[in-house]
Every structure is written in C-alpha cells, then in structure tokens.
Image: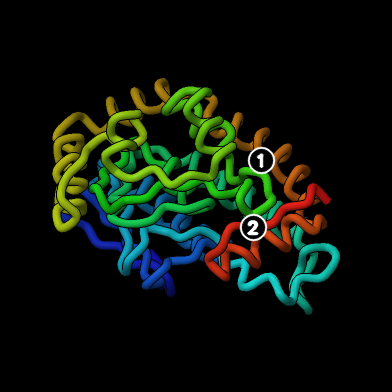
Amino acid sequence: MGPFKDIAVEKTGHVALIEIRRPPNNFFDIALIQEIASALEALDQDADCRAVVLAAQGNAFCAGANFGDGGTLDKEGQRPGELNREKAVQHLYLEGNRLFRTKKPIIAAVHGAAVGGGLGLAMVADFRVACTETRFCANFTRLGFHPGFGLTVTLPQVIGAAKAALMFYTSRRVHGDEAYEMGLADVLVPQDQVRAAAMKLAAEIAENAPLGLISTRATMRGDLADRVRQATEHELKEQTWLRKTGDFKEGVKATAERRLPDFTGR
C-alpha cells in the first residue's frame, strides 16, 4: 500500500487508521482524496481489516479547499495559470465517488474543524466522533458558492432536510455538542479522547463477522454512491456559474480577511 505523501496508514488488530498529514489545516484537494481512496480500496482487499478510522494531524480535521485571498481570481473564478477549473472539480468529484464505493465501515475522528469539502469528507464516514471543539461548517453560501462533494445528499440523509438546509443557508458553525444533539456526531468526548474513542468504536465493530459487516453495510448504504455521483454533477453545474460571479470573489476575499462579506447579488 502506498507510498503516500499526505496520509499514513497503520493497523491495530482488525482496525486500520488512516491519518491525514497536512497540518495544521489539512486542506482538501484531489491529491488528498486520491490517496485516501487508494488506501480505502487497498484495505477492502485486506481480509484482516474489518473497520477503518479516518483521523488527522494538526488543528483541523480538514479545513476545506484553499481558495487563497481571492485577489488573483480572474473573471472565471480561477487563479492565474490554473487549468480549467470545471474539469478539475469534475475530476475531483469522480475521484471522491471512489470513497463512497468502498466496502468497510469508516469512523471519522473529527477533533477540530470540518469545513466545506472537509465536512463532505467527514460525511463519507458511517459515524463521526467529535468533541466540543469540533466545528462542522457548510460555508458555501458565505463564499457566494453552492455546496459540493455530494453534501446535498449526505448531510440531509444524516440530519434531515430542514437541519441541512439551515446549515447550508446560514453557513453557521455547528460545534460538537450541537452536532451531537442533531445527530451529526455519533459520539461526543473530550478533545484528547476523540481518536481513542473512534478506535474503540471501530474495534467494537471489528469484533463482528467481516462478511456479515460488509453485506449489512452494503444494504444500509444502498445506492448512496450512485446518488452522490448524480448530485455532484448538478453541484458542479451550479458551482461553475457561481464561480464567475463577483459575489464569489467577494466571499473568498472576505473569508481570507475574516470579515463579513458585502454581497451584491452579481
């Protein structure tokens, strides 16, 4: 397996740990998603692995995409020299769909921020372990943007359509205790115990019959991967035209400057 640049993989008994190693923010991009997908697919072929924990170094679980300060974005919402952004994101979403097609239970150890695409990554998991310092944030509309990475499917499936819409429309930060109350987090522990609690849950799952686990998980998830694939096609269309707006540039700039954006609807 590997070698990997941005993640590390280790096994303890029947549990594998995938650790994202891009501290402090663990920004989200296609290279990271490809490595995680490749690791999960390799673990699917490992009969000794029955459950997986996805964790991260640094302050954040995954702080989403790095848009920079917005000052260099052109009229298409791209940076100078950047390849066609629509095709790049399409490739990202195709690679991301690999994550939803893997077979073994995944527990996300979310010890810090899971923002934008980072929230999407956390939602790939079957369960999320959090702490009061955890921040789940679908900040797309605050960027003048549209949700992506299948979140329009995965978030409402877990917390319901109304609560998902509230997160999308407000771009508010949901801390761990509130996330636990709404069902976005499944386990709430002190921050220094997040990874251990995730490993404990994975070990409890791994005590069970591996073929039965895979079969039951496939039934429970149903056509999730196909629905995510269909959703990302629509999400990409919306993101592509919104990326060209002045509001998107203003949203990125305001976020970098840590201020409220001054949107104009153009």
- Work out which quarter of the rendered image holds the N terminus and state it: bottom left
Q: Which circle, 2 or 1, is nearer the viewer?
A: 2
Asked if labels 1 and 2 touch by Cβ distance under 8 angstroms, the answer is: no
**Of the numbered discs in the image, which one, if any, rests on residue 118?**
none
For residue 263, above or below residue 74: above
The one of 106 and 253 positioned closer to us in this rendering:
253
Q: Is residue 19 left or right of residue 166?
A: left
x, y percent for residue 248: 72, 57
| Residue depicted at 62% across the width and 64% down the height | 254
Number of numbered discs overlaid on the protein picture:
2
x, y percent for residue 75: 85, 65
The residue pinned by badge 1 equals: 232
The one of 129 and 191 positioned closer to us in this rendering:
191
Dot 2, how many residues are within 10 Å of its Cα: few (below 14), some (14-19), or many (20+)?
A: some
Q: Is residue 127 left or right of residue 34?
A: left
| Residue depicted at 58% across the width and 39% down the height | 150
x, y percent for residue 262: 69, 56
Q: Is residue 13 left or right of residue 236?
A: left
| Residue depicted at 53% across the width and 44% down the height | 171
Q: CA distance from mark 2 to mark 1?
A: 26 Å
Name the element at disc 1. helix
Query: Nearer the N terminus, badge 2 or badge 1?
Result: 1
Q: Amino acid at mark 1?
A: Thr
For residue 103, above or below residue 6: above
Q: Amino acid at mark 2?
A: Pro
**Of the numbered discs in the image, which one, if any, rests on residue 261?**
2
x, y percent for residue 140: 60, 48
| Residue depicted at 32% across the width and 66% down the height | 59
Name the element at disc 2. loop
Q: Is residue 249 left or right of residue 126?
A: right
